Amino acid sequence: MIDALNSAAPPAHTAHDAKLRRAADQLEANFLAEMLKSTGFGAAQESFGGGAGEEQFGSFLRTAQAEEMVKSGRIGLAEHLFEALKERANG
């Protein structure tokens, strides 16, 4: 999962930067997944009546959608997180 997030990220200069980049990407994906959850994305629809299984697998849909959003770089939160983590690690 995390490797897929790194494909769109700028290249890291060191192994430590690569770890920070993966952490930042994963934090952004988790944040976006929670935001999608709050909007009801991936929630079971009354009309389908899929029950508990449909509701449980909705989290996979939200996670996959969030990871795709991170790969596309649409909101840029990961970049800010990366810079903050890098500054903290170096300071």
Image (spheres, rainbow, N blue to C red):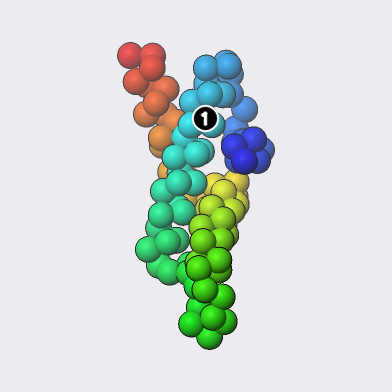
Q: Residue at x 53, y 85 (%)?
A: 47
Count of residue discs: 1
State which quarter of the image contains the C terminus. top left
Q: Residue at x 42, y 29 (%)?
A: 83
x, y (%) of residue 89?
38, 17
Mark 1 belongs to which amino acid?
Arg
Q: For residue 4, which quarter of the picture?
A: top right
Side of 6 where 55 appears, left or right: left
x, y (%) of residue 60?
56, 56
Q: Residue furthest bottom?
A: 47
Q: Secondary structure at mark 1?
A: helix
How packed mark 1 is, by other alpha carbons closer than 10 Å (few <14, some 14-19, many 20 or more), is many
x, y (%) of residue 45?
50, 78
Depth check, front residue: 28 or 56: 56
Q: Residue at x 44, y 61 (%)?
A: 36
Mark 1 sits on what residue?
21
Can residue 86 be seen in this snapshot?
yes
Depth check, front residue: 3 or 76: 3
Can residue 79 be seen in this snapshot?
no
